[in-house]
Image: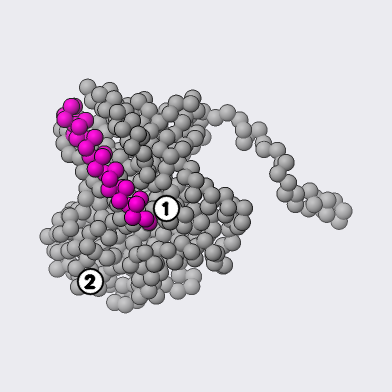
Amino acid sequence: MPMSEASAKALVAATTRRDAGIVPSAAATAPVTRAMFDELMLPIYAPAPFVPVRGEGSRVWDQDGKMYIDFAAGVAVTSLGHCHPALVRALTEQAHTLWHVSNWFTNEPALRLARRLVEHTFAERVFFCNSGAEANEAALKLARRYAHDRFGPKKFRVISTLNSFHGRTLFTVTAGGQAKYASGFGPNPEGITHIAYNDVAALEAQFAQAGDTICAVLLEPMQGEGGMTPGTPAFLQAARRLCTTHGALLVLDEIQSGMGRTGALFSYMQKGIVPDILTSAKGLAGGFPIGALLTTADVASVFGVGVHGTTFGGNPLACAVAGAAFDVINTTEVLDGVKARHALFIEGLKAIDARRNVFADIRGEGVWIGCELAAAWKGKAMDVVRAAGDAGLMLLVAGPDVVRIAPSLVISLDEILEGLGRLEKALDQALR
Ligand SMILES: Cc1ncc(COP(=O)(O)O)c(C=O)c1O
């Protein structure tokens, strides 16, 4: 039976209510446990045995009230610590103003963020998306389209590096240099060649053999996930030079290295090179999901309306938070503070190593440091991370042999010292 007009109007009125008194469902407040992860979620992660519930600065508390020092910041994401007041203010102000309008409209926070990025980097054009993988996917598509339109369809090859990590879409996982992430999903996209990272001769050989087929070189300025391996100036500069000579684009993946992590707004600024395309995500909005692609007006010009897009990319909430994060991070004080923290971390880690003799190498830039375990402890990085959890420290690995530290850019001295103390306990427990 069709609904009467009166019932329809009553139902519309009832469901138009916007009062704050709407009661949350039982599901919204029911207790939850770590065990539920294994029952409910796709088994693609192995989360720690505790569930973090609250964070402030570089401290996090779990369901039992235990406090952890955060040397992980997500995975190099919460770059201003948890619940930074400037970010909370930007988010709540925007949450009361406008959440979403689609890309059939532009919005003020996105334009303000784009203007900041253009004013403070090499870029002239910006594309916003929601994650690092999505930014790299767009970068690879843009590089292919640029080469296609300017040089023809034969210039489609991408040179990437072994051990690199660029995201989990089929294109970016294939571009990444770790076969374990890309196998079993085939057929994978074609035309990607992997060379050894920092191997200038291998890069030169690729261009010498068939430079006219290469559309892009895709590089992290320092390989993060792949083991915290800094790019040598010679390699990065050779990539720039060869790309320029052969009409290929240099795509720098600054998803982990960017937004202050190395003590510069973007790492390329410390390396004496300028990319054609740069991708950012992770720390860009200090923990609110966002990705970005930065490029020149010339490269951007090959994309027209409808060629690429996203539903959520450039939404006002993410862009408002990123704008606030940008303003805090892009100051001499904060960027120099990252370099000061680097020195303190290295000093503390060397002191631990002098007492315990556990590291083969301590390396990295800014607050992005890898501690490679000594030969006797090969493959034990994850054991150290688990023991760190027991000791009240959130820590990361970068492959099986490297313990990675990537805290907030503004972590306090007390938290650094407390965290290093807990790290030493964890090393003691895990490596015996
Ligand atoms: C260098 C680099 N590129 C891309 C990505 C993928 O970013 P997302 O996980 O946001 O897709 C990551 C993530 O770890 C990364 O470190």
Quadrant of res 29: top right
In the depicted structure, whether residue 71 falls above or below residue 332: above
In the image, is residue 262 part of the stretch drawn in magenta?
A: no
What span is colored magenta in the figure? 330-359
Identify whether 206 is placed above or below 317.
below
Q: Secondary structure at mark 1?
A: helix
Task: Say which residue label 1 marks.
Answer: 328
> Where is residue 359 shown, x and y percent of the image?
18, 34
Look at the image and say whether residue 336 sits in the magenta stretch: yes
Give, as a three-letter code, the residue at label 1.
Answer: Val
Q: Earlier in the sequence, mark 1 or mark 2?
A: 2
- The CA distance from mark 1 to mark 2 is 34 Å
Identity of the residue drawn at 60% across and 57% down: 98
Q: Which residue is mark 2?
A: 244
Q: Position of residue 380 (x, y in %)?
A: 25, 31
The C terminus sits in image quarter: top left
Residue 186 visible: no
Q: Is residue 232 visible?
A: yes
**Main secondary structure type of the part rendered in magenta:** helix
Please name whichever residue, 274 or 344, is drawn nearer the observer in this view of the structure. 344
Q: Nearer the viewer, residue 213 or 22?
A: 22
Left or right relative to 407: residue 90: right
* Amino acid type shown at disc 2: Thr
| Residue drawn at point x = 16 percent, y = 36 percent | 360
| Residue 207 lies in quadrant | bottom left
Name the one closer to the observer, 330 or 428: 330
Say left or right for 401 vs 43: left
Instruction: Say if 293 sits above or below 87 in the image.
Output: below
* Residue for point 23% across, 54% down: 161
Q: What residue appears at the point 27 percent right and 23 percent down from the top-left corner?
A: 429
